[in-house]
Structures are given as structure tokens and as C-alpha cells.
Image (tube, rainbow, N blue to C red):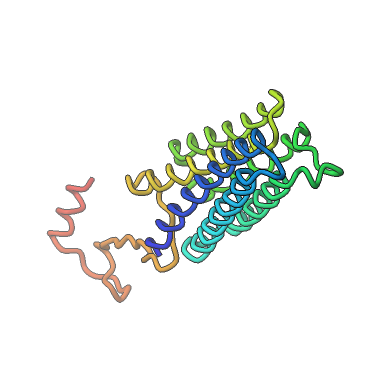
Amino acid sequence: MRERLSKALSLGFLGNVLFILFGVICFIYYLTYDPESTASKALEFLAYLVEFSGFGMLIFSDYLLSVAVRMRKLMKIAYAVYIVVEVVLMLIELNSFSFRSFYDPYSMVLAIVHAVFSGLVCFSFLQLDPDKPKFEAVIIVCIGLIFGGMLGNVMGIRIYFSIIVNALSFAVMFFMIKFLLNREEIEIDCHGDRARVAEYKSLVYDESGKKKPATLSDIAETSSNQ
């Protein structure tokens, strides 16, 4: 299961990197858009290819997390919903010329809702190993990046800027989770892990639970421990 967890984190990182690349392609696409241009059609095809490749990686990443990590149902469900929402937003954004009747790519309300939702999903990953200062700091920084993505709308940039910043934030988060896990600074309990059992030697009772007579060596050991 540890191998699955490691692969899930790697795919989560790579999938978000592809989402960043999708945002860059969108930026070029809007700058050079011409419905009759072969270059625009090629960029659109490339954008779809990158988007669905990233989508596939993230879905598989979420599946591996779900089967490898114990419990954390809220985190698993939230991340699955997040992936679907991001892909739907990307599809609408790429075809925004056809959806202008109900979709506003410069909407500040959309940017705020998108950032709040994404920040909550990012926060849910704290369930992996709470109360670890370094991990908490990583989550705080990533959430800060997500809310910073709203500044794109303030500067008059379309919602894909927020999508890019989100992808950057989650890529950093997955990278740091794997980094901290490899350094054994956080622990994530997986299915199949052996429970750690602390065994204590009793000086008064034997293994069957019956009281045993104390010996001189037991008394000496007890005195030295005190």
C-alpha cells in the first residue's frame, strides 16, 4: 500500500503540472484566437489532450489514495469533487465563446467561490497527519496561494488564472507531502500497515496473568529504574 500511496502523490503532482500547462495553452489560445486558423485548432486540440491527460492522472491518483489510505473519507470525496469541478471549469473556459450567455470568465463572485471551495479541499488534506507544524505550514501556504489566485480577476485576467494558481498550489502540496513522508516527518497510516504494539514487561505478573513472587533481581531492577 505504501507503493500505491507514493504513486498517488506522484500522479497528483504530475496531473496538476499538466493543469498548469493547460492554463498556459489557454493563455496563448486567447491571444492568437482565430476560428479559421489551423494554429488555433491545433492549440485547442493540444489543450484538450493536456486537460484529459491531467484529468486521468488526478482521477487515478484519487483512486490510489482511496484504496491505500485508511479512513479520511471527507478528504477523498472532497478531492474527487474538486477534480470534476476543475475539469468542468476548464471545458467551459476553453469554449467560453459558446457559453457567454451564462458564463462570465471575469466574474469576481466566481473567482471567490472557486477559491473558497478549493481552499477547503486543500485544508481537508490536513487529515493525513494533523498536528505536525511543518505539514500545517505547507497547507497554510498552499491555501494562501489559492486565495492569491483571486487577484487575477482584480487585475482583469480570466478565471483560468485562478485555475493555474490552484494547480500550482496542489502540485506544491503533493510534492511536499511526498517530501515530508520520505523524510519521515509525517506519517500516513495505510491499509495493511502493521499496528505498532508496545510490550511492557511486568515485574509482578507473569504472562498468564498470575502473580509471581518477586526476586532479588526484580527488586534491584525496580530500584535502579526509580
From the viewer's side, name the closer residue of 218 and 34: 34
Q: What residue lies at 70% left-to-right and 33% top-to-bottom?
A: 158
Q: In this view, does 183 lie to the left or right of 120?
A: left
Single out the residue that lies furthest toward the right.
101
From the viewer's side, name the closer residue of 84 and 223: 84
Q: In which quarter of the image is residue 103?
A: top right
Q: Quadrant of residue 192?
A: bottom left
Q: Quadrant of residue 109?
A: top right
Q: Is residue 116 left or right of residue 43?
A: right
Q: Is residue 31 above or below residue 122?
A: above
Q: In this view, does 107 lie above or below 213?
A: above
Q: Position of residue 219 (x, y in %)?
A: 17, 56
Task: Report the number of numbered marks.
Answer: 0
Single out the residue that lies furthest toward the top.
155
Q: Can the viewer see residue 71?
A: no
Q: What residue lies at 56% left-to-right and 42% top-to-bottom?
A: 167
Q: What residue lies at 60% left-to-right and 59% top-to-bottom?
A: 73
For the C terminus, which image quadrant?
A: top left
Q: Is residue 76 above or below residue 132?
A: below
